[in-house]
């Protein structure tokens, strides 16, 4: 349960950073609303994103994985649409940049709190 709450907090922080740094990604609402937007974002990534990735697998392979940036931007756009005006995204470039920043900040947050383990140790046989 604690790991889930930490991931939720990390996603909230990542969305807040994206709204502060990326021009065109804005949040208009109470502070606690960003926590709800993070829940929506998590649900979209858990339920919709796997289906979209599966359906667009040839596109992702053809673009050597760069198509996942477009999919992540689409998931952020869907989150903004479902958030009912609290989160707004002005254009495709803002969505791609925002999704990239959310991914990076979430990864770094999870590294910081121990949610994601990065094993760089070289093991001798």
Image (tube, rainbow, N blue to C red):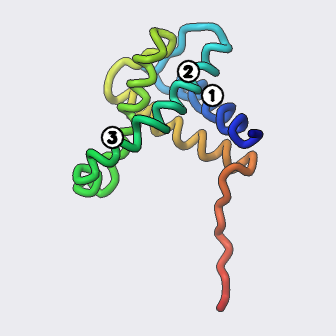
Q: CA distance from mark 2 to mark 1?
A: 8 Å
Q: Position of residue 24 (x, y in %)?
A: 42, 19
Lower sequence index among marks 3 and 1: 1
Q: Position of residue 58 (x, y in %)?
A: 23, 53
Q: Is residue 47 left or right of residue 51?
A: right
Q: Residue at x 67, y 88 (%)?
A: 124
In the image shown, does 85 or 54 lie closer to the viewer?
Answer: 54
The vertical placement of 115 against 70, above or below, is below
Q: Quadrant of residue 13?
A: top right
Closer to us: mark 2 or mark 1? 2
Q: Is residue 17 left or right of residue 65?
A: right
- Mark 3, Cα crowd under 10 Å, few <14 / some 14-19 / many 20+, is some
Q: Which disc is residue 12 wearing?
A: 1
Q: Secondary structure at mark 2?
A: helix
Lower sequence index among marks 3 and 2: 2
Q: Position of residue 19 (x, y in %)?
A: 54, 22
Q: CA distance from mark 3 to mark 2?
A: 20 Å
Q: Is residue 83 left or right of residue 108?
A: left
Q: Residue at x 67, y 58 (%)?
A: 117
Circles 2 and 1, Cβ within 8 Å, touching? The answer is yes
Circles 3 and 2, Cβ within 8 Å, touching? The answer is no
- Mark 1, Cα crowd under 10 Å, few <14 / some 14-19 / many 20+, is many
Closer to us: mark 3 or mark 2? 3
- Mark 2, Cα crowd under 10 Å, few <14 / some 14-19 / many 20+, is many
Q: Is residue 49 left or right of residue 38?
A: left
Q: Secondary structure at mark 3?
A: helix
Closer to us: mark 3 or mark 1? 3
Residue identified by numbered label 2: 37
Q: Position of residue 60 (x, y in %)?
A: 29, 51
Residue identified by numbered label 3: 52
Lower sequence index among marks 2 and 1: 1
């Amino acid at each position: 349960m604690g790991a889930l709450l930490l991931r939720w907090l990390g996603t909230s922080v990542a969305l807040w950073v994206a709204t502060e740094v990326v021009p065109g990604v804005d949040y208009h609402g109470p502070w606690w609303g960003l926590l709800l937007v993070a829940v929506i974002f998590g649900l979209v990534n858990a339920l919709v994103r796997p289906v979209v990735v599966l359906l667009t697998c040839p596109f992702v392979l053809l673009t050597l994985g760069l198509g996942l940036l477009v999919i992540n931007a689409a998931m952020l756009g869907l989150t903004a649409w479902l958030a009912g005006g609290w989160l707004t995204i002005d254009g495709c470039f803002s969505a791609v940049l925002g999704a990239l920043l959310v991914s990076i900040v979430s990864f770094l947050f999870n590294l910081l709190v121990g949610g994601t383990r990065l094993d760089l140790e070289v093991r001798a046989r």
